[in-house]
Image (cartoon, rainbow, N blue to C red):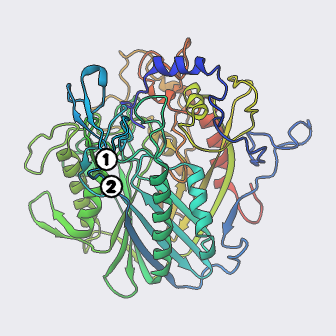
Amino acid sequence: MSASMHTRATLGFALMFSCGLAACGDDGAAVDAGPLDSGSADSGGADASSPDAGPPPYVLDGYCPGGAGCEAGADGTLRVGVAKLDVTPVIDATTDVQTVDVNGDGEFDPFAGDEFADNNDNGVFDGVWIAGFGNPRAATGVNDPQWVRAIALQNGDVTLVIAAIDCVGYFDDEVRMVREAVADLGVDYLSISATHSHESRDTLGIWGVDETQTGLDPAYMALLRDKAEQAIRAAVADLRPANIEYASLRLRDKPGGVLRYVSDSRDPVIIDDEVRLMRFLDAGTDTTIATLINWAAHAEYTGSSNQLLSSDFPNWLRKGVEEGVVASDGTALPGLGGVAVYVNGAVGSQIGPGRVRAQTWGGEDLPHESRSIAQNVGEQVASFVLEAFADGAGAVRDETADLGYRSHTFLLEIENRRYHVALLNRLFVRTTYEWDPDRPLAPGVNQPSIQTEVALMDIGRAQLILVPGELDPALFLGGYDGSNTPPGTDIVDLSATNPPDLSSAPAGPYLRDQARPDAEFVWLMGLANDEVGYFIPDFDYLLDRRNPYIDEAPGDHYEETNSVGTNGWPTMRGELTRLLEWTPEGGT
């Protein structure tokens, strides 16, 4: 979620007290599904009351190879299939659209004189609400399609699927419904991630016409589930023998350096500027089946006043990789063909366009928050992807790749009062645990937890670390020594209010350091299988003393207001560490 996505604090806080921090309305806020044994060292478990019990066993949801149904592992042949389906919301003559925007901010404000066309004639503004930034932002049309794209991979009796949806986030409950719908396919592990587009329809619920009403459309959420199922089934049906190529590039080595393409708007300025790539080809040929792209950037380059549905820069990135673009020297680069799939990375700490100094290849400065900047950045990064796979560029090709995964489900406590409001008022529609919904919700006393998961995927030379939210890149790769700060940029502005104290920063090891020792390529996939907000380093986590989570603490501490709470990263760190250390032979 972007820092520009400020929920109006005054109304939200008043709403919290009007509900008495208890369920508003007869339908309640969320279903208490009863206890869930998370198997987490942080959450205790059933025997945690015993002083000699120690941490509970770390129980995986599943793993391959060697787990149930995938005991044999690889057979020496990699098979890959791919599919994509359009999930763009329909905007037609029956759709309510904003007709007057007095101040041109893209948000509907009737008190400012804004107007809308009540095309379904019910007296209510039933807009196609765009997620990200402020609300309400109603779509008036479509700039480019939104997609669900899926790559299926199989080797022996191990089958994995990586799917990505052009949306701001996709909750755990939705992922599990899709998994249930395709359970007959024999897929060992299915990951569904959000590209984190801030220009697509609301899929989380907090960008409705006002802060008391959800932005979700049940019919659209059902369509997403149906299209995701179809795409996954089509990708599995498309499986055929394949070879694999690995490549990576760093934006610091490209024209203009990192800040031409992506920036960090929160100190310390630490950016994961690596673009990680895998290309799958029909076996023995140069014909592309799919290209998988991992790069960390908020998909919000089009900006907060935009009212045309879009997948933002991923549209031009994927299209450029598939069809070709122009290189920085003006030469035409042919596309790779096939289907390009983009998965986001460590986008916490406002990794995105905030301080970008983007230009055309001709050196013309590009305006912030515009379709032109989204297109140019997407196409320019696409050109680097194409160059990375050019002859002699250093991409590594293998005839096959062993596959594997392991995943773990656990509970994450929700301390954030703003999230309490969203749950209680059915803005967030997801199952909650570990609280009594018949008693008033009391922060720290009777408050909900949610189910989420972490996972690892092994694809030959690469290991992918899957995190269900927006991870600060420093937690993945470190960089407090300035090694991942663009040249000429201060890692910390010491004149700012409450600047981070780098002397208190963790020394590591960081997540990348804990990856599989023989992994030549280590990926961080953010917003994977859930969206639970920001994960922030402990030493720089600061809440407002009077109104925590509702108001920002003085200085640059927006991300805390969109995090699950003070225990969020410590819990996630524990789960990821134990998952990374786990082995079939000895556990952790």
Image quarter of the C terminus: bottom right
Residue 196 drawn above or below residue 75: above
Q: Mark 2 and mark 1: span between their CA atoms?
A: 8 Å
Mark 1 belongs to which amino acid?
Thr
Mark 2 belongs to which amino acid?
Val
Disc assigned to residue 463:
none
Residue shown at the point (68%, 38%) measured from the top left: 449
| Callout 2: SS | loop
Q: Which residue is outermost to the top?
A: 546
Disc assigned to residue 90:
2
Assess disc 1: are there few (<14), some (14-19) or many (≥20) residues with their C-alpha within 10 Å of its C-alpha: some
Residue shown at the point (47%, 30%) measured from the top left: 559
**Which residue in the structure is indicated by mark 1?**
95
| Number of marks present in the image shown | 2
Any part of residue 328 in sight: yes
Foreground pick, 376 / 511: 376
Residue shown at the point (26%, 41%) measured from the top left: 307
Foreground pick, 195 / 288: 195
Foreground pick, 288 / 522: 288
Task: Locate residue 344 relative to residue 414 in the image: left or right.
Answer: left
Residue shown at the point (65%, 23%) measured from the top left: 21
Q: Which residue is outermost to the bottom?
A: 284
Dot 2 or dot 1, earlier in sequence: 2
Report x, y in % for residue 430: 61, 44
Task: Locate residue 374 relative to residue 438 in the image: left or right.
Answer: left
Report x, y in % for residue 142: 25, 52
